[in-house]
Image (cartoon, grey):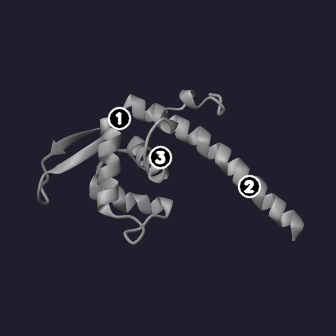
Amino acid sequence: MDLSKKEDFICMDKHNKKGRFLEACLLSLLKEEKDYGYGLVERLKSFYFNQDTINMSVIYRNLKNMEDDDLVLSQWMESEEGPDRKIYSITSKGEKALDCWIILLKDRKKRIQSIINKYEELK
């Protein structure tokens, strides 16, 4: 994929720029395993999110948008521990979007590292 051609990147063609990093995190977690909303919140801690920095409504809004975009699927599952749970899983389109995200994040990491390196040179 060519970073100069935005049309090649499924992850760049949408709304909600602020929630975009969250989308990449959720797709990554769902690639690892299916999960429900509160389970995803717990697992988002591995990306340094916590309940003080992210609200459940933001998670569910992102999951709903991702489902509308065919990046994830959901289905209701019976739970032995309480009410039924909506379980989310990644789709093949979601996996392609995650591939796109990784390319973009690697590029951003390289750019950020170059700024840090320049700063370190100037010290």
* Mark 1–mark 3 distance (CA, rounded to whole Å): 14 Å
Q: Residues within 10 Å of mark 1 (few under 14, many from 20)?
A: few
Q: Secondary structure at mark 1?
A: loop
Q: Amino acid at mark 3?
A: Ala
Question: Which residue does the image show at 54% across and 35% down from the upper left?
Answer: 100
Place of residue 87 in the rendered image (x, y in percent of width and height, measured from the top left): 24, 46
Are dots 2 and 3 in contact, CB under 8 Å? no
Are dots 1 and 3 in contact, CB under 8 Å? no
**Direction from residue 58 to residue 82 in the image, left or right:** left
**Direction from residue 52 to residue 77 in the image, left or right:** left
Q: Residues within 10 Å of mark 3 (few under 14, many from 20)?
A: many
How many dots with numbers? Answer: 3
Q: Residues within 10 Å of mark 2 (few under 14, many from 20)?
A: few
Place of residue 9 in the rendered image (x, y in percent of width and height, measured from the top left): 54, 32
Above or below: residue 3 compared with residue 47 = above
Decide which of 113, 62 is in the foreground and name it: 62
Residue at the spot of label 3: 24
Residue at the spot of label 1: 69
The label number, if any, that marks residue 113 in the structure image: 2
Q: Secondary structure at mark 2?
A: helix
Decide which of 98, 19 is in the foreground and name it: 19
Place of residue 42 in the rendered image (x, y in percent of width and height, measured from the top left): 36, 62
Question: Which residue does the image show at 44% across and 63% down from the upper left?
Answer: 45
Looking at the image, is mark 1 or mark 2 nearer the viewer? Answer: 1
Place of residue 33 in the rendered image (x, y in percent of width and height, measured from the top left): 36, 44
Q: Secondary structure at mark 3?
A: helix
Q: Amino acid at mark 2?
A: Gln
Question: Which residue does the image show at 49% across and 37% down from the upper left?
Answer: 11
Above or below: residue 59 compared with residue 28 = below
Q: Quadrant of residue 5?
A: top right
